[in-house]
Protein backbone atom coordinates (compact mmCIF):
# COMPACT_ATOMS: atom_id res chain seq x y z
CA UNK A 1 0.00 0.00 0.00
CA UNK A 2 2.91 2.33 0.70
CA UNK A 3 4.13 2.10 -2.92
CA UNK A 4 0.61 2.82 -4.22
CA UNK A 5 0.35 5.83 -1.92
CA UNK A 6 3.80 7.06 -2.92
CA UNK A 7 2.87 6.78 -6.60
CA UNK A 8 -0.32 8.77 -6.05
CA UNK A 9 1.54 11.45 -4.11
CA UNK A 10 4.13 11.82 -6.85
CA UNK A 11 2.06 11.32 -10.00
CA UNK A 12 -1.34 12.69 -9.05
CA UNK A 13 -0.57 15.26 -6.37
CA UNK A 14 2.80 16.34 -7.81
CA UNK A 15 4.72 15.89 -4.54
CA UNK A 16 8.51 15.66 -4.63
CA UNK A 17 9.66 12.02 -4.70
CA UNK A 18 12.64 12.80 -2.45
CA UNK A 19 10.30 14.07 0.27
CA UNK A 20 8.20 10.92 0.39
CA UNK A 21 9.61 8.49 2.91
CA UNK A 22 7.62 6.43 5.41
CA UNK A 23 8.69 8.54 8.38
CA UNK A 24 7.92 11.90 6.74
CA UNK A 25 5.15 13.87 8.37
CA UNK A 26 2.24 15.20 6.36
CA UNK A 27 3.74 18.68 6.65
CA UNK A 28 7.16 17.57 5.41
CA UNK A 29 5.57 16.00 2.34
CA UNK A 30 3.29 18.98 1.69
CA UNK A 31 -0.03 17.38 2.56
CA UNK A 32 -2.04 20.37 3.72
CA UNK A 33 -5.81 20.22 4.11
CA UNK A 34 -6.43 20.88 0.40
CA UNK A 35 -3.98 18.15 -0.65
CA UNK A 36 -5.63 15.74 1.79
CA UNK A 37 -9.00 16.33 0.10
CA UNK A 38 -7.36 15.58 -3.26
CA UNK A 39 -5.67 12.48 -1.85
CA UNK A 40 -8.94 11.20 -0.38
CA UNK A 41 -10.64 11.69 -3.75
CA UNK A 42 -7.93 9.84 -5.68
CA UNK A 43 -7.81 7.00 -3.16
CA UNK A 44 -11.59 6.63 -3.16
CA UNK A 45 -11.65 6.49 -6.95
CA UNK A 46 -8.79 4.00 -7.22
CA UNK A 47 -9.85 1.74 -4.39
CA UNK A 48 -13.58 1.73 -5.08
CA UNK A 49 -14.74 2.78 -1.63
CA UNK A 50 -15.01 6.09 0.12
CA UNK A 51 -12.22 7.35 2.33
CA UNK A 52 -12.47 10.81 3.83
CA UNK A 53 -9.88 13.53 4.21
CA UNK A 54 -10.64 13.85 7.92
CA UNK A 55 -9.69 10.19 8.35
CA UNK A 56 -6.40 10.78 6.57
CA UNK A 57 -5.72 13.88 8.68
CA UNK A 58 -5.52 11.66 11.76
CA UNK A 59 -2.37 10.00 10.39
CA UNK A 60 0.90 11.63 11.42
CA UNK A 61 3.28 10.16 8.82
CA UNK A 62 3.17 8.81 5.29
CA UNK A 63 3.48 5.28 6.72
CA UNK A 64 0.51 6.00 9.00
CA UNK A 65 -1.57 7.08 5.99
CA UNK A 66 -0.62 3.90 4.12
CA UNK A 67 -1.47 1.79 7.17
CA UNK A 68 -4.85 3.51 7.56
CA UNK A 69 -5.72 2.90 3.91
CA UNK A 70 -4.61 -0.73 4.16
CA UNK A 71 -6.78 -1.23 7.26
CA UNK A 72 -9.76 0.27 5.42
CA UNK A 73 -9.17 -2.09 2.49
CA UNK A 74 -9.31 -5.03 4.87
CA UNK A 75 -12.38 -3.66 6.65
CA UNK A 76 -14.41 -3.29 3.45
CA UNK A 77 -13.04 -6.47 1.93
CA UNK A 78 -11.26 -4.75 -0.94
CA UNK A 79 -7.99 -6.12 -2.21
CA UNK A 80 -5.19 -3.55 -2.01
CA UNK A 81 -4.15 -2.39 -5.45
CA UNK A 82 -0.67 -2.62 -6.85
CA UNK A 83 1.12 0.64 -7.69
CA UNK A 84 0.55 2.03 -11.14
CA UNK A 85 3.47 1.73 -13.52
Image (tube, rainbow, N blue to C red):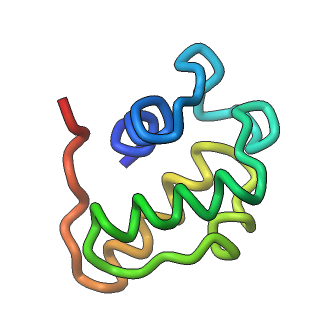
Residue 35's place in the image compared with 72, above or below, is above
- Image position of 80 (left or right of 27): left
Residue 4, percent from left and from top: 34, 43
What residue appears at the point 74 percent right and 67 percent down from the top-left corner?
58
Tell me if residue 54 comes above or below residue 79 in the rendering: below
80, 38: nearer the viewer: 38
Q: Residue furthest right?
A: 27
> Residue 42 in the image: x percent, y percent?
41, 59
Nearer to me, 25 or 53: 53
Name the spot of residue 22 as percent of width and height, x first: 59, 34
- Specify the farthest residue to the bottom: 76
Residue situated in front as seen by the camera: 42 or 82: 42
Name the quarter where the C terminus is drawn.
Answer: top left
Q: Quadrant of residue 20?
A: top right
Q: Is residue 37 left or right of residue 9?
A: right
Is 41 positioned to the left or the right of 23 in the image? Answer: left
Give the residue displayed 48% in from the left and 76% down from the top: 51
Which image quadrant for residue 8?
top left
The correct choice, above or below, for 7 with respect to 17 in the image is below
In the rendering, at what x and y percent does residue 46 appear? Answer: 28, 61
Task: Pick whichever, 31 or 70, lies toward us.
Answer: 31
Residue at 71% x, 45% y is: 31
Amino acid sequence: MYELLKGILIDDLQMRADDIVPTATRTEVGLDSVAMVELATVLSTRLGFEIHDYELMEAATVADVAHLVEERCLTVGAAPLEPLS
